[in-house]
Amino acid sequence: MDDFLHVGDVVDSRVRPLVLIDFDGVINQFPDEKVRRRRNSTDWMRPEDPRIALYSPENWFTPDRKETVFIRFQGRFRILWSSELVDRLRTLDADILWLSTWQPYTDLLNLHLGVDWETIRWYNPVTGEGRRTGKRRAVLNHLRYGRPIVWIDDEETTYDAGLAIAGNDPQAPVLAVGPESHVGISHAQMDRIERFIAAPPEEPVLRFDVCVNDHEEHWGF
């Protein structure tokens, strides 16, 4: 199973960063249904409600696009996202690669989002082989490039994953971003991603920007 995607010429592309990106809980948002019914507002909440900060326009890329994606033999899946966020991701001076359980269907994601990102084949969609451990293995494999890496995933960017990355002696800096799955990548996280891509640290430092998620309402593919 090929979970190591060759992107361009390794020598010529060495300094160009890689972005390994998940979809559900990262771009595809799972907001509180009460917030959605009230047009994404929080003015109806009590002052002490912690969701006020989460759904603040300063934190949340408020979604303005939604679609229902039909996948044969799988069913229909609602996707919800912010065009502003996708536009900012699209303009990053980096190679962006899907690292998502949507692996067999990222052509549909590219179509709806208006992007043309390539896909890392990190698990077998027929047998499911590699689905439990394949994402981390794919990240570790991409350390071989010696290129700065941004890894964005709401579930897999764990403390243990950080230990695994550090233990593989990365030769370039790594930024791991774990969004809050209800809102996906936040404004502060996107700002940090843009700064990292524009000026990666010279040393092979490992940085984690991770939210603690409650995935009870996270029903993606």
Image (cartoon, helix red, strand yellow):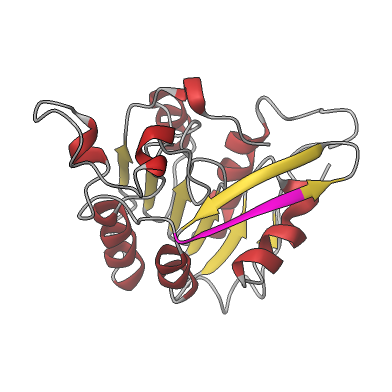
Q: Is residue 178 visible?
A: no
**Residue 157 x %, y %:** 44, 34
Q: Is residue 88 visible?
A: yes
For the image shown, how many numbered marks are present on the structure? 0
Q: Is residue 174 left or right of residue 136?
A: left
Q: Which residues are magenta?
A: 64-69
Q: 132 above or below 65?
A: above
Point 61% across, 59% down: residue:
97
Which sits in the foreground, 34 or 1?
A: 34
**Residue 24 x %, y %:** 56, 42
Q: 19 above or below 26?
A: below
Quarter of the picture holding the N terminus: top right
Which sits in the foreground, 45 or 65?
A: 45
**Residue 7 x %, y %:** 67, 68
Point 77% across, 37% down: residue:
123
Q: Quadrant of residue 44?
A: top left
Residue 209 drawn in magenta: no
Q: Is residue 7 left or right of residue 169?
A: right
Q: Quadrant of residue 190?
A: bottom left
Provide the major secondary structure of the magenta segment: strand
Point 72% across, 29% down: residue:
131
Q: Is residue 60 left or right of residue 168?
A: left
Quarter of the picture holding the C terminus: top right
Q: 103 above or below 51?
A: below
